[in-house]
Amino acid sequence: MTTVFLELALSACATTFTPGPNNILLLSSASTFGFRRCRPLILGIWTGLLTVMLICGFGCAALGGLLPQVVPVAKYVGAAYVLYLAYKTLTRSAGSGSAEAKPLTYVNGFLLQFLNVKILMLGVAFYSGYILPHGFHLGYVLAFAAIMTLCAGTGNLIWATLGSALFPLYKRYCRIVNAVMAALLAWCAWKIVSV
Protein backbone atom coordinates (compact mmCIF):
# COMPACT_ATOMS: atom_id res chain seq x y z
CA MET A 1 0.00 0.00 0.00
CA THR A 2 3.01 2.29 0.51
CA THR A 3 3.64 2.26 -3.24
CA VAL A 4 0.02 3.26 -3.88
CA PHE A 5 0.31 6.23 -1.52
CA LEU A 6 3.61 7.27 -3.14
CA GLU A 7 2.01 7.12 -6.61
CA LEU A 8 -0.96 9.08 -5.26
CA ALA A 9 1.36 11.76 -3.83
CA LEU A 10 3.28 12.10 -7.11
CA SER A 11 0.05 12.41 -9.10
CA ALA A 12 -1.41 14.85 -6.58
CA CYS A 13 1.69 17.07 -6.73
CA ALA A 14 1.70 17.00 -10.53
CA THR A 15 -1.91 18.14 -10.68
CA THR A 16 -2.16 20.48 -7.70
CA PHE A 17 1.00 22.47 -8.43
CA THR A 18 -0.44 23.61 -11.77
CA PRO A 19 -2.36 26.87 -12.20
CA GLY A 20 -5.91 26.61 -10.98
CA PRO A 21 -8.36 28.80 -9.07
CA ASN A 22 -6.64 28.28 -5.69
CA ASN A 23 -3.09 28.89 -6.89
CA ILE A 24 -3.90 31.88 -9.09
CA LEU A 25 -6.03 33.42 -6.35
CA LEU A 26 -3.18 33.00 -3.85
CA LEU A 27 -0.64 34.44 -6.29
CA SER A 28 -2.89 37.45 -6.83
CA SER A 29 -3.79 37.96 -3.17
CA ALA A 30 -0.25 37.58 -1.86
CA SER A 31 1.10 39.95 -4.51
CA THR A 32 -1.49 42.49 -3.43
CA PHE A 33 -1.59 42.11 0.36
CA GLY A 34 1.56 40.15 1.20
CA PHE A 35 1.81 36.63 2.54
CA ARG A 36 0.99 37.42 6.16
CA ARG A 37 -2.36 39.07 5.43
CA CYS A 38 -3.36 36.13 3.22
CA ARG A 39 -2.92 33.48 5.91
CA PRO A 40 -6.66 33.27 6.68
CA LEU A 41 -7.37 32.67 2.98
CA ILE A 42 -4.67 29.97 2.85
CA LEU A 43 -6.05 28.25 5.96
CA GLY A 44 -9.56 28.42 4.49
CA ILE A 45 -8.35 26.77 1.30
CA TRP A 46 -6.56 24.03 3.24
CA THR A 47 -9.43 23.21 5.60
CA GLY A 48 -11.91 23.33 2.73
CA LEU A 49 -9.69 21.04 0.69
CA LEU A 50 -9.31 18.59 3.57
CA THR A 51 -13.08 18.59 4.08
CA VAL A 52 -13.74 18.01 0.38
CA MET A 53 -11.19 15.18 0.25
CA LEU A 54 -12.80 13.51 3.27
CA ILE A 55 -16.22 13.84 1.64
CA CYS A 56 -14.81 12.36 -1.60
CA GLY A 57 -13.25 9.50 0.32
CA PHE A 58 -16.30 8.66 2.42
CA GLY A 59 -18.86 9.37 -0.27
CA CYS A 60 -17.10 8.19 -3.42
CA ALA A 61 -19.39 5.22 -4.08
CA ALA A 62 -22.55 7.27 -3.60
CA LEU A 63 -21.15 10.24 -5.49
CA GLY A 64 -20.12 7.99 -8.37
CA GLY A 65 -23.78 7.23 -9.05
CA LEU A 66 -24.76 10.88 -8.75
CA LEU A 67 -21.78 12.28 -10.65
CA PRO A 68 -23.46 12.49 -14.06
CA GLN A 69 -26.21 14.69 -12.56
CA VAL A 70 -24.01 16.75 -10.22
CA VAL A 71 -21.11 17.74 -12.48
CA PRO A 72 -23.06 19.78 -15.06
CA VAL A 73 -24.59 21.96 -12.34
CA ALA A 74 -21.48 22.11 -10.14
CA LYS A 75 -19.19 23.17 -12.94
CA TYR A 76 -21.34 26.18 -13.85
CA VAL A 77 -21.75 27.24 -10.22
CA GLY A 78 -18.00 26.81 -9.70
CA ALA A 79 -17.18 28.73 -12.88
CA ALA A 80 -19.51 31.54 -11.81
CA TYR A 81 -17.75 31.82 -8.45
CA VAL A 82 -14.32 31.86 -10.12
CA LEU A 83 -15.58 34.60 -12.47
CA TYR A 84 -16.75 36.54 -9.41
CA LEU A 85 -13.21 36.22 -7.97
CA ALA A 86 -11.83 37.40 -11.34
CA TYR A 87 -14.13 40.43 -11.21
CA LYS A 88 -13.03 41.23 -7.62
CA THR A 89 -9.39 40.94 -8.73
CA LEU A 90 -9.89 43.14 -11.81
CA THR A 91 -11.74 45.88 -9.95
CA ARG A 92 -9.31 45.99 -7.03
CA SER A 93 -8.02 49.54 -6.78
CA ALA A 94 -4.36 50.51 -6.71
CA GLY A 95 -4.64 51.13 -2.98
CA SER A 96 -6.02 47.66 -2.25
CA GLY A 97 -2.79 46.58 -0.65
CA SER A 98 -3.06 49.31 1.96
CA ALA A 99 -3.77 48.66 5.62
CA GLU A 100 -7.48 49.54 5.35
CA ALA A 101 -8.12 47.17 2.42
CA LYS A 102 -9.10 43.62 3.25
CA PRO A 103 -7.89 40.47 1.50
CA LEU A 104 -10.24 37.55 0.91
CA THR A 105 -11.15 35.67 4.07
CA TYR A 106 -10.98 32.19 5.52
CA VAL A 107 -14.61 31.65 4.50
CA ASN A 108 -13.85 32.64 0.88
CA GLY A 109 -11.04 30.08 0.71
CA PHE A 110 -13.10 27.38 2.41
CA LEU A 111 -16.16 27.83 0.16
CA LEU A 112 -14.06 27.94 -3.00
CA GLN A 113 -13.15 24.29 -2.45
CA PHE A 114 -16.78 23.19 -2.70
CA LEU A 115 -17.16 25.09 -5.97
CA ASN A 116 -13.78 24.13 -7.41
CA VAL A 117 -14.61 21.39 -9.89
CA LYS A 118 -10.91 20.63 -10.40
CA ILE A 119 -10.56 19.67 -6.73
CA LEU A 120 -13.82 17.71 -6.69
CA MET A 121 -12.90 15.76 -9.82
CA LEU A 122 -9.36 15.09 -8.58
CA GLY A 123 -10.73 13.82 -5.28
CA VAL A 124 -13.17 11.44 -6.95
CA ALA A 125 -10.74 10.31 -9.64
CA PHE A 126 -7.77 9.79 -7.33
CA TYR A 127 -9.80 8.08 -4.60
CA SER A 128 -11.46 5.82 -7.17
CA GLY A 129 -8.20 5.07 -8.95
CA TYR A 130 -5.77 4.69 -6.08
CA ILE A 131 -7.67 3.82 -2.90
CA LEU A 132 -11.01 2.20 -3.76
CA PRO A 133 -9.44 -0.82 -5.53
CA HIS A 134 -7.85 -1.76 -2.18
CA GLY A 135 -11.16 -1.66 -0.31
CA PHE A 136 -12.67 0.79 2.12
CA HIS A 137 -10.62 1.36 5.27
CA LEU A 138 -10.88 4.38 7.53
CA GLY A 139 -7.10 4.70 7.64
CA TYR A 140 -6.88 4.73 3.84
CA VAL A 141 -9.49 7.50 3.57
CA LEU A 142 -7.70 9.60 6.19
CA ALA A 143 -4.30 9.02 4.55
CA PHE A 144 -5.78 9.90 1.14
CA ALA A 145 -7.24 13.17 2.45
CA ALA A 146 -3.99 14.04 4.24
CA ILE A 147 -1.82 13.32 1.17
CA MET A 148 -4.07 15.34 -1.15
CA THR A 149 -4.19 18.28 1.28
CA LEU A 150 -0.44 18.19 1.92
CA CYS A 151 0.42 18.13 -1.79
CA ALA A 152 -2.08 20.86 -2.69
CA GLY A 153 -1.05 22.89 0.36
CA THR A 154 2.59 22.76 -0.72
CA GLY A 155 1.61 24.00 -4.17
CA ASN A 156 -0.48 26.75 -2.57
CA LEU A 157 2.48 27.90 -0.48
CA ILE A 158 4.71 28.03 -3.55
CA TRP A 159 2.21 30.19 -5.45
CA ALA A 160 1.53 32.44 -2.43
CA THR A 161 5.28 32.87 -1.81
CA LEU A 162 5.77 33.81 -5.44
CA GLY A 163 2.98 36.36 -5.09
CA SER A 164 4.54 37.72 -1.93
CA ALA A 165 7.87 38.10 -3.70
CA LEU A 166 6.07 40.14 -6.34
CA PHE A 167 4.47 42.41 -3.70
CA PRO A 168 6.86 45.35 -4.33
CA LEU A 169 6.21 45.16 -8.08
CA TYR A 170 2.46 45.06 -7.52
CA LYS A 171 2.39 48.58 -6.12
CA ARG A 172 4.04 49.81 -9.28
CA TYR A 173 2.09 47.77 -11.85
CA CYS A 174 -1.14 46.98 -10.01
CA ARG A 175 -3.53 47.54 -12.93
CA ILE A 176 -1.56 45.23 -15.22
CA VAL A 177 -1.14 42.55 -12.53
CA ASN A 178 -4.85 42.71 -11.65
CA ALA A 179 -5.82 42.41 -15.32
CA VAL A 180 -3.50 39.43 -15.89
CA MET A 181 -4.67 37.63 -12.73
CA ALA A 182 -8.33 38.32 -13.58
CA ALA A 183 -7.75 36.97 -17.09
CA LEU A 184 -6.13 33.84 -15.68
CA LEU A 185 -9.05 33.31 -13.30
CA ALA A 186 -11.47 33.81 -16.22
CA TRP A 187 -9.44 31.22 -18.15
CA CYS A 188 -9.84 28.82 -15.20
CA ALA A 189 -13.61 29.41 -15.29
CA TRP A 190 -13.66 28.70 -19.02
CA LYS A 191 -11.65 25.50 -18.49
CA ILE A 192 -14.13 24.41 -15.81
CA VAL A 193 -17.13 24.68 -18.14
CA SER A 194 -15.34 23.34 -21.19
CA VAL A 195 -14.48 20.00 -19.55
Image (cartoon, helix red, strand yellow):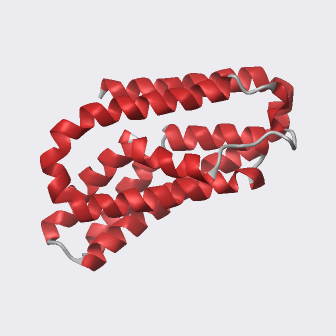
Image quadrant where residue 170 sits = top right
Quadrant where the image shows the N terminus: bottom left
Q: Position of residue 159 (x, y in %)?
A: 62, 46
- Closest to the observer, 135 or 82: 82
* Residue 156 appears in the figure: yes
Q: Position of residue 178 (x, y in %)?
A: 69, 26
- Closest to the observer, 73 or 135: 73
| Identity of the residue drawn at 82% across and 33% down | 169
* Residue 19 appears in the figure: no
- Closest to the observer, 108 or 137: 108
Q: Is residue 17 above or below residue 1?
A: above
| Identity of the residue drawn at 76% across and 42% down | 102
Q: Is residue 45 above or below residue 95?
A: below
Q: Is residue 70 above or below residue 56?
A: above
| Identity of the residue drawn at 35% across and 54% down | 11
Q: Position of residue 151 (x, y in %)?
A: 47, 59
